[in-house]
Image (cartoon, grey):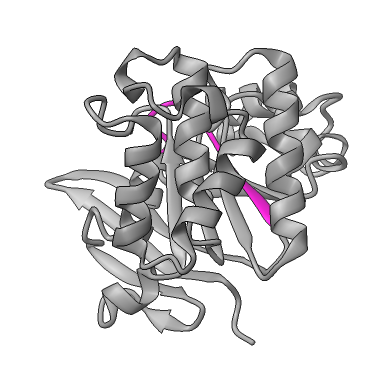
Amino acid sequence: MPNVLSVENLSKKYGDTIAVDGISFEVERNEIVGLLGPNGAGKTTTINMVLSVLEPTSGSIRIEGIDVARQRSQALDCTNFAAVYAPLPGNLTVYQNLHVFGLIYGVKHLSARIESLLEQFELERFRNLKSGVLSSGEQTRLCLAKAMLNQPHLLLLDEPTASLDPATARDIRTKIREFAMRGLCGVLWTSHNMYEVADVCDRVLFLSHGKIMLEGDPKTLPQDHGKSTLEELFIAVAREPLTLERV
């Protein structure tokens, strides 16, 4: 079976500005890959190209072997997404949001699937509340429930736990890890929380100025480059990416 996601020589330019500069990587099944880097490194631009929100300047994206540029709808059928900057419609209730998106994704046995997700993400008591009145943490849980609706094979998460308290964030990480390991799913996860990344990711890619500078196991990569923690390595990549040397 092909990898869940294959990106090859992907670039995005805005005039003379290069946002993403010829990156290549893959996400395998049952794997959580962290896409790391400072603000402006190209993380969200990359995710938006995978989602076909942005058109690449060059390069290719394949989801389960399907070329996104040629068969967009088919490729995105098995994909879903959550981000703190993309809240669901605030004038719809929690249940209505899940119902509408479930219809869009063509989810079978939708009512039962919604009930399962309401319980899984502790949203049952909010089911009839408009999502716009929920706290930021509750809205985040709703967005993650929406992202699980169609049981995607590729799950894209952009800062998924940024507004959650530590205990809830830990529970969400556990749920996503279980989801990734249970089926055929692969996850591409961006975060600035290095503790979270080390806890949940199997592999990380460090972006700087649109290029992948480093790649490897988050638990061993810092020592490979003479740093004691992933946070120290993150800072080094952000400040002086070209000075890193492998020990």
| Quarter location, residue 95 | top left
Indicate whether 127 appears above or below 137: below
Q: Position of residue 166 (x, y in %)?
A: 71, 15
Residue 240 seen:
no
What residue range appears in magenta?
32-42
User: Is residue 77 found inside the magenta-colored segment of the image?
Assistant: no
Give the residue at x 46% y 69%. 108
Question: Would you place residue 247 above or below residue 178 in this image?
Answer: above
Residue shown at the point (54%, 55%) measured from the top left? 113
Extreme residue toward the bottom, this view? 1
Q: Looking at the rendering, which quadrant does residue 86 occupy? A: top left
Query: Is residue 38 one of those drawn in magenta?
Result: yes
Q: Position of residue 82 (x, y in %)?
A: 44, 41
Residue 160 percent coordinates (x, y): 53, 33
Q: Nearer the viewer, residue 212 or 142?
A: 142
Name the quadrant of the C terminus. Answer: top right
* Residue 179 visible in the displayed image: yes
> Residue drawn 35% across and 28% down?
85
